[in-house]
Image (cartoon, helix red, strand yellow):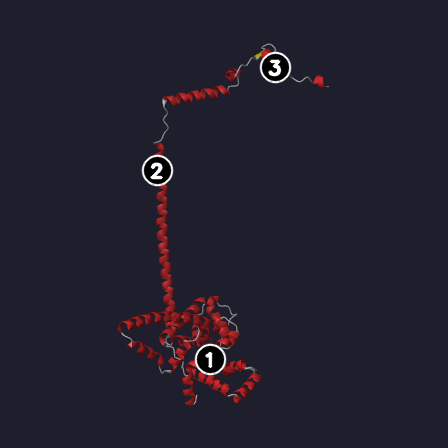
Amino acid sequence: MLSDLDLIFKVQDGDESAFSELMRRHYRGVVNYIYKFTHSVESSEDLAQEVFIRVYRSIDRYRPEAKFTTWLYKIATNVSITAVRYSNREKNVSLDEMEESNQQTGDEKIFSASDFTFRREISALIFEALETLPEKEKIAIVLCKYEEMPYIEVAEVIGCSVGAVKAYVYRGRMKLIEKLKPHLRKDKAHGL
Amino acid sequence: MDSKKIVELILEYPEGEISEANKMELKRHIRENLGYSELYEQSKGLWKLMEEWRDIEPSDDYLVKFWNRVTEEEEARAHWFGRFLGILRFNLGWSAAAIVTFLVLGVVSLYVFNTGTEMTLSEADLKDNEALIDVEKAISTESSKPLELYGPWNELDNPETGDASVDETHSSDLIRPVDFGDIY
C-alpha cells in the first residue's frame, strides 16, 4: 500500500485518483473531527469538503517536513474554529434578538430557553461541556481523545510546545470533570 | 512526588504517556489516598463518557460531491477570468481610442490657434526697429568713423609713414612707453 507521501507525490504529478485515495483514508476522520466542533452532521460534511478543497488547491506547496495528517488537521482546525466563531456570533445576535423580544412579551420564555441547556443526550452534554473550554484546550482534548494523536503532533497542529499541550489537556480535563461530575457519578453507578 | 505532579499524572494516565517508574508510584498513591483514587475514577469515567459520543458516517457520495465542486470552481474561475479579460480588452480599446482622439484634438487646436496670431507692427515700431538696425550696423563696422560717437579721437594716421601721431594736448593722458635703457 502506498504511503500518504507517495500519494501526494502522485497528486503533484497530476494523478487525481491518488487524491481520491487520500480522501478515502482521511475523510471520515476529518468529518468526525469537525463534528466535535459543530455538532451538526450537515455542516461537518460541508466543512470537510472545504478542508479537502483547500488541501487539493495547495498540495503543490506541500513539503514533506510535516506529516500529512498534521497538515490536514491543522487546516481542519482552522476551518472548524472559523465556522464555530461565525456561528457563535450569529447565535449571539439571535440570542440578543430573543432577549429583546422576551423583554417585550414577558419573562416566561427565558426559562424555556434555559431548559435547552439541560438536554439529556450524551453527545449534546459533551459538546456543550467542550464548548465552554478555551479553544486550545478544546482542540488538544479532541485531538488527543478522539483522533488519538500523540502530544507531539497535537503540538504541531496547535503551534505550541509539547509541555503546553500537556497543560491544555490537563486543564481541559479538570474543567470537564467539574462540568460533567454529576453524569460521571451516575455513569460510575451504572458501571462505567 | 508532590501532589500537583500526582494530579497531572492521574489526568495523563489513560493516554499511557507515562514512564513505568511513574506508573508504579502513581498506582501506589491511588491505592493509598482516597482523594487521588476518586480523581482517578473521575478522569477514567470522563474518557469513557466521551467515548459515548459516537462517530458519524459521512455520506457515500462525498467523492462525487468533491470532484463536482472542484470542476464547478474551476469553471467559475475560468468564467470570471474570461470576463475580467473581456473587461480589460474592452477598456484597453476605449482607452486607446480616447488617447488618439485627445492627441488629434491637441494637434488640430495648436494649428488653428497658431495661424491666427501673426505679429503686426505699428509704424512707430517699424521705425524703432530700423533705428536699432542702424545702431547695430554702426557699432559692428570696424572703422574709426562711427566710433566718434564715443568721444574726441585726435589720432591722425600718417598716410606716408603709416605711423599714428599723437595729439600733444592729450599726451599726458596717455601712458608713456617704458624706456628699457633706464633700467639696464
Q: Give me the disc on residue B172.
A: 3
- Distance (Cα) linking label 2 and label 1: 86 Å
- Distance (Cα) linking label 3 and label 1: 125 Å
Q: Amino acid at mark 1?
A: Met
* Residue B132 sits above or below residue B86 on the image: above
Q: Position of residue A1 (x, y in %)?
A: 49, 77
| Horizontal arrangement in the rendering, residue A186 relative to residue A150 (left or right) | left
The chain carrying label 3 is B
Say whether marks 2 and 1 touch (CB < 8 Å). Answer: no
Camera-nearest residue between B66 and B36: B36
| Horizontal arrangement in the rendering, residue B77 relative to residue B3 (left or right) | left
Which quadrant would residue A31 be assigned to in this image?
bottom left
Q: Amino acid at mark 3?
A: Ser
Q: Give me the disc on residue A189.
A: none
Say whether marks 3 and 1 touch (CB < 8 Å). Answer: no
Which quadrant would residue B109 be assigned to in this image?
top left
| Residue A13 in sight here | no
- Residue at 42% x, 21% y is B130
Camera-nearest residue between B54 and A54: B54
Nearer to us of marks 2 and 3 is 3
Camera-nearest residue between B65 and A121: A121
Callout 3: SS = helix
| Residue A73 in sight here | yes
Figure quadrant of the C terminus of chain A? bottom left
Dot 2 corresponds to which residue? B109
Callout 2: SS = helix
